[in-house]
Amino acid sequence: MSLRISILAAFTAAVVSSGAFAAVTVGSAAPDFSLPDANGKTQTLSQYKGKTVVLEWNNPGCPFVQKHYSSGNIPKQQADATKEGVVWLTINSGASGKQGHLDNAGAQAFVAQYHAAPSAYLFDGDGKVGHLYGAKTTPHMYIVDAGGTLRYMGGIDSIASTDKDDLAKATQYVPQALAELKAGKPISVKTSEPYGCAVKYGP
C-alpha cells in the first residue's frame, strides 16, 4: 500500500472515529424504517421480521467501498448470506450533489458492474435512516436478528485500509457474526470501530 493511501486510511479512520455518533445499541430493538429501492419499490425493515437482516451503508465513490467491491469481498459476502436466507439491504445515505449519490439507474449499474447480490439497494437521500442508526462511514455494517434485535454494528473487517492485500489477513466481522448467530453461539465481536469515508449527509 502506498504511503499516500496509508495516510488516507489513517486520516479517514481517525476522523470518523471521533465522538459518539451511534444512535442505536447492540442488544436493543433495531428501529424500523421505510425507504425506496432501486427498482421503485418500498422496503421496510419490519417486512423482514423472522429473517436475519444485514444493513450495509454504501458510497460507490469511496475508495474503501471500491476496495471491498472490486476485490469481490462484499459481493461474495452478499451472495453467501442471501443463499443462507439472510436479507442484505445496501443503503445509500448520500445527499443529492454529494459524492456517491445515485439514482435508480446508477444503483442498478453499480450492482451489475460488481456482480453484487444485495436483496435490495435503498436510497436514504435525506439521511434520516442513517442518522437513526448512527451510520458514520461507508461501509458501516449492522446485523439484525430474526426477532428484530440489533446483534452487530461496526466495521466490515479488522484492518482499516484501502489495500486489497489486507483482506486475507483481516477478520471479516459480518460472516463471522452470521455464522455464530446461525449456530446459536454468542457473537464474539458485537461491536467494532467502523472505518471508511464519512457518510455524505446533506446539510
Image (tube, rainbow, N blue to C red):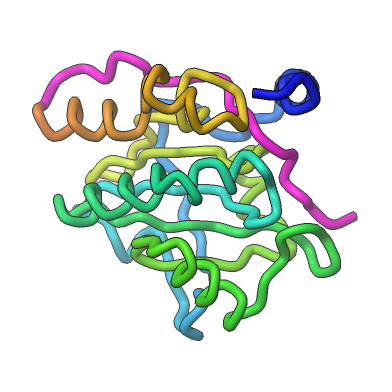
Which residue reaches farthest front?
2
138 relative position to 143: left or right: right
Nearest the eye: 156 or 61: 61
Q: Quadrant of residue 82?
A: bottom left
Residue 166 rendering spot, x and y as whole percentages: 48, 23
**Residue, x 35% and y 30% (percent of image)?**
151
Q: Quadrant of residue 170?
A: top left
Q: Point out residue 126 in the picture as x, y percentages from the top left corner.
A: 74, 63
Range drawn in magenta = 184-203
Residue closest to the eye, 150 or 65? 65
Q: Residue at x 32, y 66 (%)?
A: 47
Quarter of the image with the C terminus in it? bottom right
In the rendered image, the vertical position of residue 78 relative to residue 172, given as above or below: below
192 magenta-colored: yes
Q: Is residue 68 positioned above or below 18 on the image?
A: below
Q: Is residue 129 left or right of residue 151?
A: right
Magenta stretch prevailing secondary structure: loop
In which image quadrant can residue 160 be found? top right
At 51% from the left and 60% from the top, the residue drawn is 33
Question: Residue most toward the top?
Answer: 188
Instruction: Name the image quarter holding the N terminus.
Output: top right
From the top left corner, tell me how far across and down residue 14 is, in percent.
76, 18
